[in-house]
Image (tube, grey):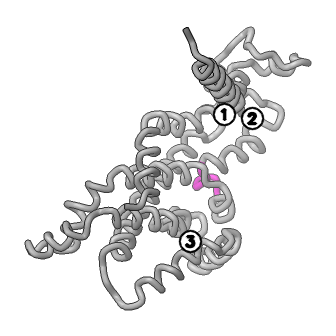
C-alpha cells in the first residue's frame, strides 16, 4: 500500500519530469525546425501558407547547394584554422598565467590578480574598439594573425584554471621542490594531469566561442577569403542563395552547427565535470 508521502512524492516526480520534458521540447524545437526546413524544397517551402511540421517531399538538394553555390568549404576551413590555432595559443597562455597566480610567490601578486580580474568589468565593446585600432595600425586586417591575436587569452579562463590549480595540495609542490623538480616540470607532470577535466572544459568552451565568433571577424575582415562560418552566413544570404531561399540557408546553418553539436554530445560529461571541479573550493 502506498502511503500519503509516497503519493505526494510520485505527484512531485511527475510534475518535475513534465516540466523537464516541456523545457526540452522548447529548447530542441528550433533545432528540429532548422533541420525540417533544410530538407524542404524551395517550391514546397514557398507553397506552405501554414507551416507544416513534417516534410512531405524531403530532399537533400539544399545541402548540395550549400557546398556548390557558395564558398562554404572555404568558410569551414578558415574557421577550423582559426579555432585550432587560437585554442592552442590560449591554452599555453592561460596555463602559464594560472600557474603563476596559483603557485608562484612574487611581490604584489594579489594586487595584480585583483586588477586582472577588474578587466572583466570593462565592456567588451570598448575592448573591441581598442583591438580594432591596434590591429588596423599594425596593418593586420584581412589576415589570420589579426583574427587570432586578440583571442589568445581570457581573464575568466585564467581565473577558472587558477581555482582548479589551487585545489592541489601544497604538500605536493613542496615535495617536488625537495626532489629538485623544476616549476615547469611540476606543472607538466603533476598539475596539468590532475586538472585535465578543467582544461578539457576550457578547451571545448573556447572551441565553441571561436566557432561562433561573429563581431570581431566581421570588423577585421572584408575579404571573403578570410570569412569565418558565422560571417559566411551573412555573405551566403546576401550574395549566395538570396534572402528568399530559406531552405538552402537552413541547410548551410545545419552544416555549420553540426560540428559543435557533435563536440558537445561527445564531451558533455567532461564539461560538467570540469565546471564542477573548477567551481568547487577545498
Mark 1 touching mark 2, by CB under 8 A? Answer: yes
Q: Residue at x 68, y 20 (%)?
A: 39
Q: Quadrant of the C terminus?
A: bottom left
Residue 228: % across, % down: 59, 51
Measured in 3D between alpha carbons, the distance from the residue under mark 3 to the one under mark 1, in whole angstroms, is 30 Å
- For residue 105, which quarter of the picture? bottom left
Q: Is residue 117 left or right of residue 59?
A: left
Mark 2 element type: loop
Q: Residue at x 59, y 38 (%)?
A: 256
Disc on res. 241: 2
Residue occupied by mark 1: 69
Mark 3 element type: loop
- In this view of the protein, which residue sits in the foreground, 257 or 156? 156
Up-down relation of residue 240 to residue 106 (above or below): above
Measured in 3D between alpha carbons, the distance from the residue under mark 1 to the one under mark 2, in whole angstroms, is 7 Å
Mark 1 element type: loop
Would residue 104 be counted in the magenta stretch?
Answer: no
Residue 151: % across, % down: 52, 65
Residue occupied by mark 3: 140
Measured in 3D between alpha carbons, the distance from the residue under mark 3 to the one under mark 2, in whole angstroms, is 31 Å
Q: Residue at x 43, y 39 (%)?
A: 269
- In this view of the protein, which residue sits in the foreground, 77 or 118? 118
Q: Residues within 10 Å of mark 3 (few under 14, many from 20)?
A: some
Amino acid at each position: 500500500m502506498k502511503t500519503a508521502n509516497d503519493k505526494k512524492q510520485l505527484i512531485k516526480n511527475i510534475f518535475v519530469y513534465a516540466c523537464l520534458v516541456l523545457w526540452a521540447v522548447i529548447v530542441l524545437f528550433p533545432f528540429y525546425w532548422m533541420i525540417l526546413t533544410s530538407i524542404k524544397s524551395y517550391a514546397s517551402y514557398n507553397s506552405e501558407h501554414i507551416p507544416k511540421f513534417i516534410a512531405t517531399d524531403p530532399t537533400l538538394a539544399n545541402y548540395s547547394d550549400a557546398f556548390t553555390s557558395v564558398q562554404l568549404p572555404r568558410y569551414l576551413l578558415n574557421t577550423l584554422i582559426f579555432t585550432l590555432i587560437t585554442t592552442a595559443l590560449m591554452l599555453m597562455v592561460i596555463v602559464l598565467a594560472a600557474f603563476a597566480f596559483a603557485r608562484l610567490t612574487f611581490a604584489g601578486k594579489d594586487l595584480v590578480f585583483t586588477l586582472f580580474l577588474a578587466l572583466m568589468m570593462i565592456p567588451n565593446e570598448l575592448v573591441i574598439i581598442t583591438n580594432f585600432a591596434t590591429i588596423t595600425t599594425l596593418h593586420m586586417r584581412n589576415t589570420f594573425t589579426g583574427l587570432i591575436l586578440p583571442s589568445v587569452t581570457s581573464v575568466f579562463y585564467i581565473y577558472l584554471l587558477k581555482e582548479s590549480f589551487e585545489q592541489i595540495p601544497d604538500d605536493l609542490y613542496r615535495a617536488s621542490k625537495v626532489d629538485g623538480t623544476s616549476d615547469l616540470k611540476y606543472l607538466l607532470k603533476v598539475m596539468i594531469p590532475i586538472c585535465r577535466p578543467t582544461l578539457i572544459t576550457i578547451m571545448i568552451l573556447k572551441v565553441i566561442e571561436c566557432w561562433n565568433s561573429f563581431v570581431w571577424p566581421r570588423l577585421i575582415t572584408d575579404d571573403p577569403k578570410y570569412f569565418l562560418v558565422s560571417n559566411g552566413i551573412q555573405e551566403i544570404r546576401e550574395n549566395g542563395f538570396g534572402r528568399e531561399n530559406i531552405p538552402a540557408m537552413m541547410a548551410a546553418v545545419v552544416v555549420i552547427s553540426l560540428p559543435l553539436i557533435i563536440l558537445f554530445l561527445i564531451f558533455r560529461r567532461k564539461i560538467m565535470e570540469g565546471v564542477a571541479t573548477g567551481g568547487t573550493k577545498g
